[in-house]
């Protein structure tokens, strides 16, 4: 049995056979993915699932990681922030470091592939060493719609040499003279973060986190970051608490390398003070089972972001059949079909209003959760992502 | 004449839509109108038809992207409803469909003092479809086989043989209906299938209805 067959139970009927047929047309093609890390972060998480699946359907797929010292990664971090609109000071020597490390890495890799897929800005300059055969595709996972122009114009000189670019949302893109495709990210339904949990497993994890299920749970899983608006979530919870005896769980990653995050976390702790029904849980980066169990235990999941990337935590919660109330930001608006698979809101009051509404209408909540799961099943699973890549290769072969 | 076994089998074909961004967007309804006049027909197709391929299970509240954007993002429900009731089956070509959409928006704007725009919502991003055909390697020669296969294939097969066949490939009745009539002589069933309005529902509902219609014929006995 193939790896892809493992997904047969969770994807819509016909999908696996369809993907197998789609893959036939690009059998044996060599594909090379290059990104900046093998562990941690959404890109690595997706590649860990996607690369074995591409291999499983008959492609010859490699995954390389660009290597560089601390200096290089502090440069690319500054690039990353600048491309997402934060003002950064970028010196000439930083640009030189970026170019040198890309040149050194290009000597390590063999680009002898039919498709070379470069993820994000860190390895973008590798295209300087492209061979004449093979298509090069730049896969941008971040929002570069409002960049610091100096950094974008530096990066753009490489991007325009690719055969195509892929973005996660149209609004994340820039005008480019090459074809640009839209591919949403995805979740792996069989990963620890999303697989089914037995009742026993779930209880064990919740006990470890000190969360009881005696009251309905409102949950937000996200970093303690102003853009995720945890304080707004507490305010919404307080508005709801007047009428419904609920508890709030705010679970998120640590803020050790982020001074701003630490400040937000202490503000959140301060706002939650003296309320035994507000639980603040700091989770390590690999707390996949914990997130899974919390999402499954939740009554309503919130992602009240003010700014967001794609926001895949929404799809994760939807996959667990939960109604989600999300901020009107980034990819949340694509995942939540208003009033069908969840609600998008623009304010604290909006969030409170929709929580009220759902708690008062459990049958709506159940139907919304059911539709949310189906919507994810058909649009945001890794199998759909696999199909997009296969279709793109098919298109390039025309 | 009704035949139990078709001379030419029905070949099931699915499809995948690769979504290409045109790099153009509209913030208000005037910009929407002007851009609709200029974009390639593949973009009109994307926003009015392949919408269904993206919503295989859930039919959104409005049956095309233009109506959805007007109603949800601009919060102009009047235009959303006017565009939502548009039936692309009424048009011979995507060009005539484009002309009708332009007329609806123009008429709507002519009655307003100010141009509605997406203040809180998202701009409209224009896309175009790149449809990749995928032969499924499955074929049916009888109604029973047809029904069995249709029940199990990917929903994109339903899309390909209805929307894609009708509007882009010029097979006005849709492939299912054509085959029923030409190969099995089942004119009544063919007519019922061609009368299904796919624009007001989802692919799964269309699949379910076609299967139900086939079952009704099969239950009459002669086809078992």
Image (cartoon, coloured by chain):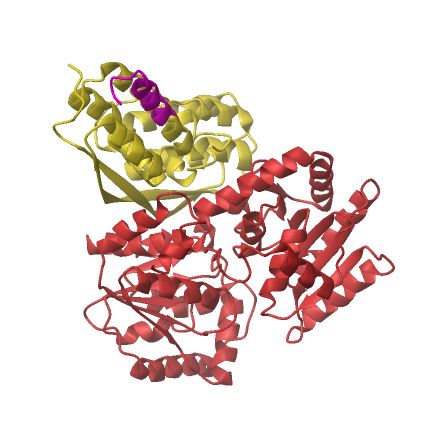
Residue found at x 20% / y 56%: A397
Determine the colour of chain B.
yellow
Q: Position of residue A39 (x, y in %)?
A: 49, 73
Residue B49 appears at what percent x and percent y? 35, 33
Residue A228 against residue A120 in the figure, above or below: above
Residue B28 percent across, percent down from the top left: 49, 37
From the image, state the color of chain A: red
* Quadrant of the rendered image containing residue A131: bottom left
Measuring 57% from the left and 51% from the top, which residue is drawn there? A314
> From the viewer's perspective, is B92 left or right of A321?
left
Residue depicted at x 28% and y 41%: B14
* Total marks in image: 0
Residue B37 location in percent, x, y?
Answer: 34, 33
Regarding residue B33, the answer to whether it shows in the image is no
Q: Can residue B164 be seen from the camera position used here?
A: yes
Q: Which residues are magenta?
A: B209-224
Q: Is residue A236 above or below residue A356?
A: below
Nearer to me, A28 or B215: B215
Which quadrant: the N terminus of chain A? bottom left
């Amino acid at each position: 049995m193939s790896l892809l067959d493992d997904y047969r139970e969770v994807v819509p009927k016909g999908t696996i056979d369809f993907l197998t047929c789609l893959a036939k047309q690009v059998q044996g093609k060599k594909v090379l993915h290059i990104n900046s890390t093998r562990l941690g972060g959404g890109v690595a998480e997706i590649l860990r699932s996607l690369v074995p699946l591409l291999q499983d359907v008959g492609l010859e797929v490699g995954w390389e990681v660009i290597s560089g010292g601390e200096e290089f990664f502090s440069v690319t971090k500054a690039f990353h922030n600048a491309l997402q609109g934060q003002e950064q000071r970028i010196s000439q020597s930083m640009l030189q470091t970026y170019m040198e490390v890309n040149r050194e890495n290009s000597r390590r890799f063999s680009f002898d592939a039919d498709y070379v897929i470069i993820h994000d800005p860190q390895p973008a300059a590798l295209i300087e060493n492209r061979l004449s055969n093979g298509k090069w595709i730049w896969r941008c996972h971040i929002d570069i719609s409002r960049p610091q122009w100096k950094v974008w114009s530096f990066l753009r000189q490489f991007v325009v040499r690719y055969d195509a670019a892929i973005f996660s949302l149209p609004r994340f893109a820039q005008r480019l003279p090459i074809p640009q495709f839209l591919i949403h990210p995805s979740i792996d339904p069989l990963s620890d973060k999303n697989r089914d949990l037995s009742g026993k497993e779930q209880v064990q994890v919740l006990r470890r986190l000190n969360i009881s299920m005696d009251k309905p749970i409102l949950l937000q899983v996200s970093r303690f970051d102003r853009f995720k608006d945890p304080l707004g979530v507490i305010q919404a919870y307080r508005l709801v608490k007047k009428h419904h005896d609920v508890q709030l769980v705010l679970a998120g990653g640590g803020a050790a390398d982020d001074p701003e995050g630490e400040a937000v976390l202490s503000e959140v702790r301060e706002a939650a003070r003296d309320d035994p029904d507000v639980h603040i849980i700091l989770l390590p980066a690999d707390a996949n089972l914990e997130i899974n169990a919390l999402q499954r235990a939740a009554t309503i999941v919130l992602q009240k972001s003010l700014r967001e990337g794609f926001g895949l935590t929404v799809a994760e919660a939807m996959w667990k059949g939960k109604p989600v109330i999300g901020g009107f930001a980034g990819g949340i608006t694509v995942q939540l079909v208003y009033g069908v698979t969840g609600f998008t809101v623009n304010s604290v009051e909006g969030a409170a209003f929709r929580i009220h509404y759902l708690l008062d209408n459990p049958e709506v909540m159940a139907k919304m959760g059911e539709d949310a799961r189906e919507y994810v099943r058909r649009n945001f699973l890794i199998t759909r992502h696999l199909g997009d890549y296969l279709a793109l290769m098919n298109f390039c072969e025309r | 004449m009704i035949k139990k076994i078709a001379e030419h089998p029905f070949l099931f074909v699915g499809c995948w839509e690769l979504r290409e961004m045109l790099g153009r967007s509209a913030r208000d309804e005037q910009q929407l109108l002007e851009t609709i006049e200029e974009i390639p027909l593949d973009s009109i197709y994307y926003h009015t038809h392949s919408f269904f391929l993206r919503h295989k299970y859930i039919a959104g509240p409005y049956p095309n992207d233009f109506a959805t954007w007007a109603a949800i993002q601009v919060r102009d429900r009047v235009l959303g409803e006017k565009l939502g009731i548009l039936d692309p089956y009424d048009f011979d070509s995507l060009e005539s469909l484009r002309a009708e959409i332009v007329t609806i928006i123009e008429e709507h704007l002519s009655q307003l003092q100010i141009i509605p725009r997406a203040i809180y919502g998202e701009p409209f991003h224009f896309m175009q479809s790149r449809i990749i055909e995928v032969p499924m390697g499955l074929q049916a020669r009888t109604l029973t086989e047809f029904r069995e296969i249709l029940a199990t294939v990917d929903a994109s097969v339903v899309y390909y043989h209805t929307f894609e066949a009708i509007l882009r490939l010029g097979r006005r009745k849709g492939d299912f209906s054509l085959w029923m009539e030409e190969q099995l002589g089942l004119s009544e069933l063919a007519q019922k299938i061609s009368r299904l309005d796919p624009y007001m529902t989802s692919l799964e509902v269309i699949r379910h209805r076609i299967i139900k219609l086939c079952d009704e014929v099969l239950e009459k006995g002669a086809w078992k």
